[in-house]
Image (cartoon, rainbow, N blue to C red):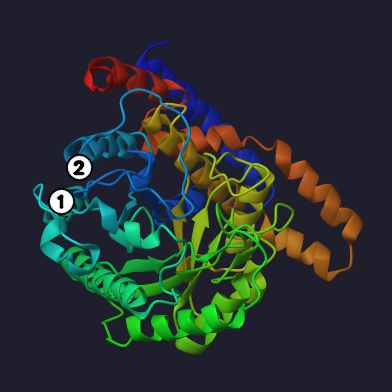
Amino acid sequence: MGIDQRATQTSNAYSLAKERYAEYGVDTDRAMEVLASIPISLHCWQGDDVGGFEFKEGDSFGGGIAVTGNYPGKARNADELRQDLDLAYTLIPGTHRLNLHASYAETGGKKVERDEIEPGHFSAWVDWAKENRHGIDFNPTCFAHPLADDGFTLSHPDEKTRQFWIDHCRVTRRIGAHFGKELGTPCVTNIWIPDGYKDIPVDRKSPRERLRDSLDKVLEEKLDTSHNLDAVEAKLFGIGSESFVVGSHEFYLGYALTRGTLLCLDAGHFHPTEVISEKLSSVMMYVDEILLHVSRGVRWDSDHVVVLSDEVRAIAEELVRGEYLKRVHIGLDFFDASINRIAAWVIGTQSVIKALLLALLEPRDRLNRLEAKWDYTGRLAFLEEIKTLPFGSVWEEYCERQSVPIGMNWLEKVRDYEKTVLSNRT
C-alpha cells in the first residue's frame, strides 16, 4: 500500500471513529490535543543494560539491579546511546523527555568519583537535549559501586560510607538544577537506594532513622523548584533485600508529606497483587505532585517492557478521571536485553501513550452521571461497551498528525537500523 493511499485510509477511518465517539459525547480532536501535551520520560538505561559510562576498575555491579539477555548491538558509549535514542524518539508520537542516571557522566576516560561529578560531565547531554527539545530528569546512582556492595548506602551504619552517598546525592541535585535552568523545564531528581537485608533483621528502626537523617542532609540546600524537583522512591523488596527494605512505601510517604518532596510510585515496587492505580486518588489528596515509574513486573519486580495491560490502563484512567495530569510526572523504568533495545523503548512508551489516549477518550461525564444515580448496572454495561469503540483509528490518526510511522511501519525502521548500525557493534 502506498503512503498516500495509507494516509487516505487512515483519514477515512478516523472520520468514522470521530463520529462514533461523538455519539457518546467524546471530542476525539480534543483528546489528541491533550495527549500531545503530556511528556513521557524515557529511561536511558534501557539502551545499554544499565551499564553507564563512568570509568570503572573491575566489574562491580552490586545493589539490587540485574539485566538478562545478550541481544546484539547495545550502546557502548554515550554517543551511541544518544544515536539510538534519536531513532526511538522519531518513532514515538509526541515530544518527550529523558531520564538520566548519574553513572552516565562523560568524564573523558578519567576516574571521577560519584561525589565529585559536576554539570560539565553532562554537557553533551544538555547540548543534545537542547537540540531535540527534550527535558532531562536525573537520578543519583546508588548501586554498581564498591561502596554499595554490602547492600547499604544512605542508611549505612558506617558514617564515612554514608557521607559519601550523602555527598553524591547532593551533587546530583545541583546537576539536576543545572539541567532545569539550561533546558527551561524542571528536572525531577529522584532518589532510589537498594538498602536492605536479605534475611530477617533484628533492628528495623536504626536504618530508617539513619536514612531519614541522611535525606535531610541531602535536601539541606534549597534549590529553585523551577529548576529542580526532588522525589523519593519506595520499594517492597529487591535482589539481596528480600526480607527488609529500609525505604519502604510507608517510610517515603511519610517523608514526602513532612518534607514536601515528590513521592515516586513505581508500578513494580509493590506486592504482585498490589497496584498503584488504586493508590493514586489517596496519595494525591495529600502530596502536591508525584512521580510515576511505569514498569511491568512478572511475578516480581522484574522490570519487563511495558505493554497495554489492565494496570497500565487503570493508571492512565486514574490520572485522567482525577484530573491529576498536571500534578504527575510520568517516566518509564524497565530494561530488557533479550530483545532489540530500541524496539523496547518504542513498545513501552507507545503502550503508555495508548493507555493515556484510551483514558482521554472515555465518556467521563456520562459515566459519572450513571454512578451518581446509583446506576451500577448501567455503569458496568457502559464500561464494557466502550471497550469496542474504534480506538485504533484514533491512535493511527494521532500518529499521522505527529508524523511518526503508522502501524508496524516503525518496526521496519528499527530492523533497518539494526542491519546498518547495531550489527556493526561488537
Q: Which amino acid lies under the numbered mark 2 shown in the image of this protein?
A: Ala
In percent of width and height, residue 91 lies at 36, 34
Decide: marks 1, 2 in contact (CB < 8 A)? yes
- Vertical order, 385 against 27 (above or below): above
> In this view of the protein, can residue 242 be seen by the observer?
yes
- Quadrant in which residue 45 is drawn: top left
Q: Quadrant of the C terminus?
A: top left
- Quadrant in which residue 219 is drawn: bottom left
Nearest the eye: 122 or 309? 122
Q: Quadrant of the N terminus?
A: top left
- Vertical order, 181 against 273 (above or below): below
Tell me the element at label 2.
helix
- Quadrant in which residue 165 is drawn: bottom left
> In this view of the protein, can residue 219 be seen by the observer?
no
Disc number placed over residue 78 in the picture, else none? 2
Residue at 54% over, 76% down: 252
Residue at 27% over, 86% down: 221
Mark 1 highlights which residue? 106
